[in-house]
Image (tube, coloured by chain):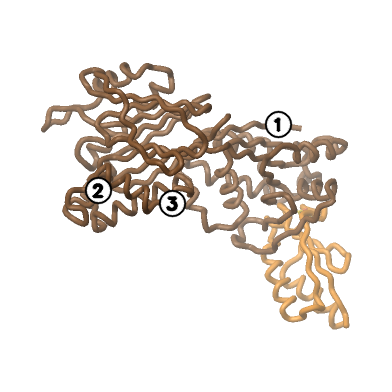
Amino acid sequence: MKWALDIGIASIAKLGEELCGDAVEILKNDNSTIVVVSDGLGSGVKANILATLTSKIAANLLSKGVVMKDVVDTITATLPICQIRQIAYSTFTIVQIFDDGQAYLAQFDNPNALFIRNNEVTKVLGTVKEVSERTIKEKSLVFEEGDILIVVSDGVTHAGIGALKPLGLGEEGLIELIKTRINLTGTSQDIAEQVKEYCEIYSAMEPGDDITVVVLKLRKPVRGVILSGPPLSKGEDVRIVEEFFTGNRRRAICGGTTANIVAREKNLKLHIIPDYCDTSLPPTASMPGIDLVTEGILTLTRAVELLEGGKLQLKDIKNKEDGASQLLKWLLQCDEIDLMVGLRVNPAHLTPDLPFHLGQRSSLLQHLRELLVARGKKVTIKWF
Amino acid sequence: MKKVRIELCVGTSCHMLGSADLSLVVDLLQQEYEEQVEVGYCTCLGACAKGPNVKVNGKVLSEVTPEKLKTEVVNILSA
Ligand code: FES
């Protein structure tokens, strides 16, 4: 992976609607990320269904290599037709960004996407093309490190109508807003939230349309390595610890015994932080040069449980300091994660007298890997 | 002045068996006896099934309850 894509999404439904009529779909395949932003006709449930269908169909077909014309055909043919207006309609913006920075954009009736390089904001206009009786604007771009692409639904450019911006924010207004008020050095999520908040303010906190802001930023991938569990043969301790310290990676340790082995081999001090933020989990520890040291099985089990729903976001755990939340924050910040898993079991855990059952490290980490891959992380696992 | 060195195991098994409660007792003892009580933490004392385990002045105590820990420490300090 040459580049990693930092994605931020912020959206809010029109006042009085529970469901947002805009939908965002993100799909990663081997060498690219596909992002589809769709805005369904009208608002509420109906719009939400149209938008969701559009974005799911587009993302799935594209990720399988189907060409744009066929994708648009399929969308048109599949969408349910509005009883009143007799049309099946939803606008969309499709972005496919490859790991090497090459990008392809197709826009249909959404506000123009904005491209930002060195604080210079430009509209992505593209060449007009007729596809299945629809006018699509296509554009190829090459992203470099730090480049940002912002895709919005028309709720953003219409923000403020009837309130603080009688004619709506408009595309020029949005560009002005980004140039003057938005801190572009933050994460994509920060940028998306900031833009959304301004739109809410312009609408006097009563948005007249669904508002969606998607921000994509290209950055260097963050690599991380987790060491969990001592190696099967004791003689391997030195080699494994050495390997753990190779490469330009962030490092974390999950496991008390493992942490002790690293401390011993590297002559580092392991300091347990006796601060029970959550008494259901053992405390964490610190070690020089290591981002995070946690207990093993219980912490990993909790982290896996939290990830399982697929809905967990960084902001849900932002203020939590227990081992599992800290581990998840660490994991979610990485793009590429190497799991180094030792299979030696603490002999003291093997006695049948243990009055509870401890999950198996190997199956836990296998599961963790699947959950992280589903989130678009590149994960390797190495057993020893 | 008598001193007690407590080492509380906060490893996986001991945690499941109640070491978080013991850490509260340890905090209380430290408040009461200040520098007479020195506290450390470790990740396994090798007696997991009999946890929670605490080392008090070098001796490993097993199946320690909060009361048992408090009595043990108070006894040493007032002996
Ligand atoms: S975890 Fe406490 S003795 Fe093993």
User: Label 3 neighbourhood size at 10 Å, few (<14), some (14-19), many (20+)?
Assistant: some
Q: CA distance from mark 2 to mark 3?
A: 19 Å
Colour chosen for chain B: orange
Q: Nearer the viewer, mark 3 or mark 1?
A: 3
- Do pointers 3 and 1 mark residues of a single chain? yes
Q: Position of residue B71 (x, y in %)?
A: 78, 76
Q: Residue furthest left?
A: A84
- Do pointers 1 and 2 mark residues of a single chain? yes
* Chain ID, brown in image: A
Dividing the picture into quarters, in which one does residue A140 lie? Answer: top left
A369 and A120: which is toward the camera = A120
User: What residue sits right under mark 1 in the picture?
Assistant: A382
User: What residue sits right under mark 2 in the picture?
Assistant: A169
> Which amino acid type is shown beneath numbered disc 1?
Lys
> Which amino acid type is shown beneath numbered disc 2?
Leu
Q: Residue at 40%, 32% (x, y): give it.
A: A35
Ligand 1 lies in which image quarter?
A: bottom right
Chain-order first, disc 2 or disc 3? 2
Q: Residue at 66%, 42% (x, y): give it.
A: A359
Q: Residue at 62%, 61% (x, y): give it.
A: A279
| SS under mark 2 | loop
